[in-house]
Image: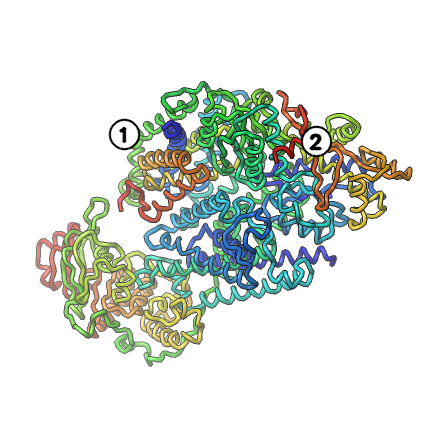
Amino acid sequence: MSDAVVFYTVTLIVYGVVDVIACLGLSQQFGVAGVTNFGFIIFQAAGAYTASVLSLPSDHANGGFQLYVGGLNLPFPLPWIGAAIVGGLVALPFVFLVGKRLRGDYVAIGLLVAAVMANLIVTNYRSFLNGAAGLSLVPSPLQSRLNPQSLRYQWGYAVVGILLALLTFWFCRRLTESPYGRALRAMRENDLVADSLGKNLRVLRAQMLVVGGAIAGLSGGVLVGFINLWAPSAWGYAETIVLFAAVIIGGAGNHLGAVLGAILVPLGFEEATRFVPAFGPPGLIPAFQWVAIGLLVVIFLRLRPQGILPERRRRLATPAAVSGLTTGDSLASLPLGRRPGPSHGRDRHDDVLEVRGVSREFGGVRAVDDVSFVLKEGHLTGLIGPNGAGKSTTLALLAGTVPVTGGRIVYRGQDITTMPAYQRARHGIIRTFQLASEFKRLTVLENLLSAVPDQPGESFMGAVAGRRHWRAAEKVHLADAAALLERFGLSAQSNAYAGELSGGQRRLVEIMRALMARPDLLLLDEPMAGVHPELAALIGEELLRLCSRGMTIVMVEHELSYMDRFCDPVIVMSEGRVLAEGAMTDLRRRPEVVEAYLVG
Amino acid sequence: MEIFLASFGFGLITAAVLAIAAVGFTLQFGVTDVLNLAFGAVMIAAAYVAYWLNQAGLDIWLGLLVASVAGAALSWLLNTVVYAPFQRRHASPIALVIVALGMTLIIEFGLQAIVGGTSVSYTMASGRTVQAGGLQLTVVQLVIMALAIAVMVCIHVLLTYTRLGKAMRATAANRPLARTCGIRSGRVINLTWLISGALCGCAGTVFAMNAGSFNATSADLFLILILAAVFLGGPGRAYGAMLGAIVIGLATEISAAYVTPSYKDVIAFLLLFVMLAWRPTGVLGAS
Amino acid sequence: MADLAPFTGPDAALGPTYLAACYAATQAINNAGGVLGHQLSCKQVDTRGDPADAVPATRQMFASTSNLALVIGVTSDEAASVVPIINANKTVVFAMTGQSEFDHTHFPYFYRLVPPDLEESYAMVVIARDKHYKRVALAFGNDIGSQTFVQPAISAIKNAGLQLVANETLDLSATTFRTEAEKIVSAHPDVIFTEALGSTEATFLSEVQSLNGGKFIPIIGTSATISPAWYKSVAAAVGASNLSQNFLADNLVVETSGPAYTPFKAAMDAIKSKVGNTGNFDTYLTSPGGVHLYDGINLSALGMVASKSTQPAVWKAAMEKIADGTPGATVVHSFAQGVAALKAGKKIRYVGPGGPTSFDSYHDSTGIFQINKYDAKGNVKVIGSITAQQLRSVS
């Protein structure tokens, strides 16, 4: 190999490393956590600029032909560390965009616009980062002692880059393959449901923005140390599209896929076109190249949305049930009972939940209108009514999925009217959903484990601390989940994706998942719809047994025979209002109830 | 005062062009639920159709008409061939946005491969400049503004008095409900793509006339102004988009006069940002 | 010969201009027997106008090009990232950047036949003063290449006793510039200095015209406005006759007749069919990239022949001598003449269509400026020249 070929090879390795690191950050954000950051390039740029101004001397030193802030002349590796830190910090202003209120596509638009805006401001505001001309003469790491243009230096740079890419890979993997990563994937699959299970979406997404930003910032630092300059033309928003194309083609959610995508698209694809002999008018080949990237994205999303290397299925070995539960045993022996509520124990209330005059309007229509009732501890309360009576909305109001427009909700003596859903879930109020809401690309076991509260590995720091920190707890939870699966006859499917199950099985998964959350107050929305009657009866029995141990349950159900068998009291709703409340046998005798229910 | 009136006038022209585009975009999004980021690319493609006819000797105002038809056809095709199959497979909104970005690349750079990188202009007389107070507008600009007003009136009539318009509004409000109420959403959606596509083609040509010179990637930044106008008024709301267009048009030009022109588009971006963070349903939308 | 320059992005017009010069020079050299038996060819290397893309492009160029003799192109878009690499590869580069960081940086293999941007700003001011314009407005694009003119122009305007009445930066991604145009029009300038590439200039000037009641304000452009693509878009937007009556540009001295021009024109005409339709072809005969890179290639080729070496470290010294001239040297105006004179055992000095060359210690050769205009058909006409004293008087 001639020197020129070696230099070119090393350049490709360094660019490949930069792309791999960036794609890993994007894979973590988008592939694992479902945060669509169309402004990803901002963070890479922030890192590159930071590394530049940290390693450059003050702007008078170069004869003053370029203007910039900073100019601290810091030694390696401080500029790279600074790049990662600033890349992470730059994410903070965008946190307000990623709260749960905003649709994912709106967030994407917001970040895309931010990328265009940031580039425009940096280009036009010259005294900040030297405007359109960008920063040049950025020192290479250790250039005072080594010759950056020597082959040995270049190889050294490539090796350091590869090590950093490996470190990033290791870090992303550690995050993803932990209970924390499971929560991120649950959020990706269905954020509303993750919210109802106590996951703080805003915090999780903010952490992803910061982590992804720091990784992107590092990639920018590595790049700028190699090419020695950085300018607005290097970070047009279109560069983000290329990175997205890489992650989608490689396989979103699989970090190896991100590595493959980085090597195939930004590196391989763009580099390959340099070898295409020139034809047609100038600019034709690059135009075709963009068209091809667009086509690849659309075709992959259409024909192989999972990418070349799809996300792996995480098979978990189920240990022998530590709680000693065997088939046929009741759930009562499982540690599934409620967790202590906020004021539970210190001030024991028989009234678990008190609903006072609660209303909800949707565009002028009162879906729930001045509803009041009280839930007693240890009761399985039924909620019935015709379609559109407001039953599901009522459950949503209790769980906090939908905010009330009027009235108050008091839970164990505490006013929780304005408490967000995830906090209610953490206080023990857990709901299920009327429509299928399993996390489709999590296995059945993972679905169950995702609900467990207070997992040591479910915080960011817990995940960083590593498997040793959370392995023991995970083992216990796994055993609980396995026992639960055994009880409901789903053991064979424990490592199947929840999305592959039948409708009835999915219902079961959802109920089991809710139980794994160890609810104090369980809100079930048509738990038995589509479930085989025998199994439904089993569910009912188990729910009653849980109630006898102090759990409070509300169940919306159409099938009145289940109400007869399991529920007392039963609340009847019609047109958004509570029509009647009492034992089912009494209600059946009341004409207005019969009329409302049968006519509706 | 003079500079204020002048920039007010410029703001009105920008608003006129923006209004046609934003109303088209917002109808498209509201009814079909596709955040079609390729809207700007389709605009420019239609503007080129008008350019080719103009080069062949056709009057540009006739070219505008043909460009509208081309915009409608292209938009309909885009939905039928690309977006609709994705929606049938229940692709997430975010996947559709990524697809739309992909389509932007395909249309924009496909066009560039054909027309090359140099900028072109229509052959047209811009007419004399009319001065009134500090306002100074050319005849063409006045015609563009009149055209925008006419389009807005047509949209108002469509939405308020026709079965189709009511169906569009109902579909925008709640698609499954509209279907159960017997509104055939498939037909409504196809017609929406045609109508919004025609607005897109019209906006593209007017945009190109107004800019004086354009190339395949000229609408990149304009798309963001469109988004700002749409989100300001509330996505899916035609009247909101009209209002948004006026606000964005005036805000950018007046801030250019008083702050510095370098940042005039930043003002629009900031407005879009604030709307997304504070009230994503728009100033007229429900909270 | 590698033409390392933007072929895409906002400055996409630059790469092809240089390529035309490369085609012309190499074909003429090959027809005259080549260099030491080698035939020359041209290769385009696209930097996309992005300094980050330019680095692998340059590395790839070195890795995949055997017998790379010379690099040409290298605009302000990518110079800062690629010049150190080219220099480290010990390959001579003739660069087209006027950036001031190269004014006092020593790269042994770096040469430039274009002046620093600040001198070009002075030239524009001299033209304005000669035309008795008093009130000057500036309108430059927000890209690197254009912004470097602003500060030197402002100080030169003051030194020349003229008045700066407006200074607007044109954001190349924006779609209208009405407010900028209105600010300039309402400042009532006698002349506007400008350089904005892409569709920006065309849009901006048409808006100035319409806001000024249809009347065109005189324009003085930089040498970058002498290019086929610029003329094509601006003339379409404001009318060719307006442009011919109200537009002047500074440009480096390029000959439009005489002993050097004749072979140059013949060489360019010979490759006309290779260039394709990018506007008025004759503009290449006066565009700085076309002329000076043609000279750079000829100088390099003659340097190799004179030193009988293709080692850059060897031939670049010979090339410098041929460029600057030595006492008693025979002046030649083309590669063929030079080879003939060398064969006859004479010392030579090459003076091409770009005029005589004299490199300073940083390998900059500051040319002499002239004044250009477009005629109604879009041909470039020379209507005057600017002396070094005139430049000094405003600096």
- Which x, y percent locates residue A162? 59, 63
Q: Tell me the subunit letter for badge 1.
A: B
Q: Is residue A429 above or below residue A575?
A: below
Q: Nearer the viewer, residue A534 or B12?
A: B12
Q: Which residue is mark 1?
A: B161
Give, as a three-letter code, the residue at label 2. Answer: Val
Q: Is residue A554 above or below residue C89?
A: below
Q: Nearer the viewer, residue A385 or B28?
A: B28
Res B150 → quadrant: top left
Q: Is residue A388 above or below residue C128?
A: below
Placement of the N terminus of chain A among the 4 image quadrants: bottom right
Res C96 → quadrant: top right
Give, as a three-letter code, the residue at label 1. Answer: Tyr
Q: Nearer the viewer, residue A516 or A483?
A: A516
Residue at the (31%, 37%) spot, across then down: B240
SS for tag 1?
A: helix
Q: Are marks 2 and 1 on the same chain?
A: no
Question: Is residue A235 among the parts visible in the rendering?
Answer: yes
- Which x, y percent locates residue C127? 61, 27
**Image disc number at residue C315:** none
Depth-wise, is mark 2 or mark 1 nearer the camera? 2
What distance separates the C-alpha of mark 2 from that of mark 1?
70 Å
Residue at the (29%, 76%) spot, across then down: A334
Q: Which residue is mark 2?
A: C253
A535 to the left or right of C50: left
Q: Tell me the subunit letter for badge 2.
A: C
